[in-house]
Image (tube, coloured by chain):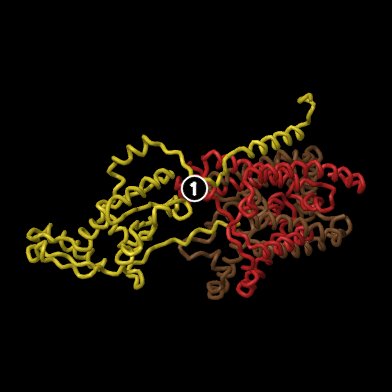
Chain colours: A red, B brown, C yellow
Amino acid sequence: MMLPFFKFGMFGDEISLVIAFIIGIGFGFFLERGGFGSSKKLVAQFYLTDMTVFKVMFTAIITAMLGVFFLSSIGLMDISLITIIPTRLVPQIVGGLVLGFGFVIGGYCPGTSVVGCATGKIDAIFFVIGVLFGAFIIAELFPYIQGFYNMTSMGKVCMPQYFNIPYGIVVFAVVVLAVAGFAGATFVEKKFANKSGEGK
Amino acid sequence: MSEEQKVNDSEAMDKTVEAELDSHAVKHPPKPYSNPYLVGIGLGIVLLLAFVIMGRGLGASGAANTVVSVAVDKVAHEHAQNNLFYQDYLGDGTTSPFKSWLVFEILGVIVGGFLSGILAHRVRKETGKGPRISNKSRYIFAVVGGALMGIGAKLASGCTSGQALTGGALLNLGSWAFMLSVFAGAYILAYFVRRLWI
Amino acid sequence: MDFKKFTLNQKLGILAIFLGFIALFMPDPFDTHKSVVDVNEIAAKMNDETIYINPTELADDIIQGKADFMLIDLNDEKVFNEYHIPFSVNYTTEDLNPDNIPRNERIIIYSNDNIKSAQAWFLLKAQKYRAVYLLKGGLSNWKECILFPKLSEGTTAEEKARNSKLVEVSKFFGGQPRLAGIETEESFKPKSLPKPKIGNVIIKRKKEKPKREGC
């Protein structure tokens, strides 16, 4: 068992920054490949004419999920060493709704807006400015919303533990749901793209 | 050369450059987007590499929070040092806050996005928007949308890259709840802001 | 079913479901309390001198405020409360797992005797911890060398230097050096064991704030 490398002390902080840069390149590369540099394409998800966001996101999720599961299950990786963000259920749901509103108003999310900037989209630049501004607002309000922020704080909890279902079963369920979702998404796309006359 | 001649020459040059760029764009139209599932697998492998090498996932909003924290610290040091939010991103002063994993990752995202864009001839100055609004309106809404994102991301400890992708792959309870909320929020509001896009 | 007739996307979908199906039969990834032990490797390591750390080395690390290690005291609570080396934590053998013990720090173990610490060493090595060390001679040796060091006659300059270092270290930890010749083995009455200086911290442990790993 020697994965994750960094958590076993295989290399230090300087190298981890280089790795961050390289991984970032991969991240940005594939985001752009999928067309996520374009706000129109991203938002089309929510008008049901182009379900690429859903397809890419969930394919990525099940790919990484399967990778993590198999590597840990056979003992090559210590899954408990992977950083998990603690759950704060209600604030996260509220934050998610707010983020959803921001997504469909602004046309980007923080990661994709950077890709948009990198490929010359002017609206992406304004979006980034907006994100910085929003961060400033919440930063100033932060000390006053601690009560809300820490509501329903459940610590680090994963779905298998919470629902008391074996990890492998959850993995299988997620894969099946995702693939079913992909089939459904393709169906929806065809239906609505024809309706509005707008293709991809 | 008289002044007039110089102006005419430079105008002519501008026109030739423009014509060249146009013909380049015509000869190299943007390539169609790749198969979303293959893109997803690529993205998933990048995420998996982050897990395997670093024991952490991807992110984006954290970098924005860092930038804001440093800026506020420069302008109002006392205030920043006493604020829970800024303290978190500024660290204890021993290393630069910019030496953060997310900041370097975002720098990579810029390079990677540009690289893919160049290869697909998709790097061009443009504004994505619906046909019913002006560029200016679009920019204003972009800022508003971005601000909402900046706020929501801190409330949820992350954005779609960090929480949805990373937490999603790790079957994190809060991340899945977050992910569903994002889609819910976006779909609910989509009808009401449709003038922006369609 | 003609496999070739499926589109790429359909093949990918089938592959995904297949992998998910296999997942149903795989062991739980969080089941880290079971372990496969490389018997030869551990047996060889047991004879390696480098798994021991001398009390003087440990004392130096503590004085310098180093924070790159976790010091584990395996004695029971009563003994621990009487005296423990500053900055040590009290664990039982049941606590020795990744939930409590970080994988990327040096782990230094001691107990009053050598048995508990040896058991702990094995438990951690079996869980593939890489940097596990035993305090040579246990707590008794620590008391002997650090708290109550035996000073020599101190005639040569070398001996004088050595003595003053021992006195310095001993005083740092609240101990009491045994002067040579003046006190015999029998007549030495150590003052009560010092309370480890954790409240009034003279030693500043340079613990790094854990790096943000959020998003």
Vertical order, C78 against C12 (above or below): below
| Residue B37 visible in the displayed image | yes
Vertical order, A186 against C75 (above or below): above
Vertical order, B77 against A200 (above or below): below
Residue at image x 39%, y 52%? C93
Q: Amino acid at mark 1?
A: Phe
Tell me where residue C151 sits by quadrant: bottom left
Vertical order, C207 against C192 (above or below): above
Give percent across and percent down for residue A49: 85, 48
Give percent across and percent down for residue C17: 71, 37
Callout 1 crowding tier (Cα within 10 Å): few <14, some 14–19, many ≥20: many
Q: Nearer the viewer, residue A154 or B33?
A: A154
Q: How many marks?
A: 1
| Residue B117 visible in the displayed image | no
Q: Nearer the viewer, residue B77 or A46?
A: A46
Q: In which quadrant is the C terminus of chain A drawn?
A: top right
Describe residue A196's horizontal placement relative to residue C79 as left or right: right
Q: Which residue corresponds to mark 1?
A: A6
Tell me where residue C180 sits by quadrant: bottom left
Describe residue B22's horizontal placement relative to residue B94 as left or right: right
Secondary structure state at the residue bearing disc 1: helix
Give percent across and percent down for residue B160: 68, 54
Describe residue A28's horizontal placement relative to residue B31 as left or right: left
Give percent across and percent down for residue C141: 23, 56
Residue at image x 86%, y 44%? A199
Name the chain letter of the residue that bears numbered label 1: A
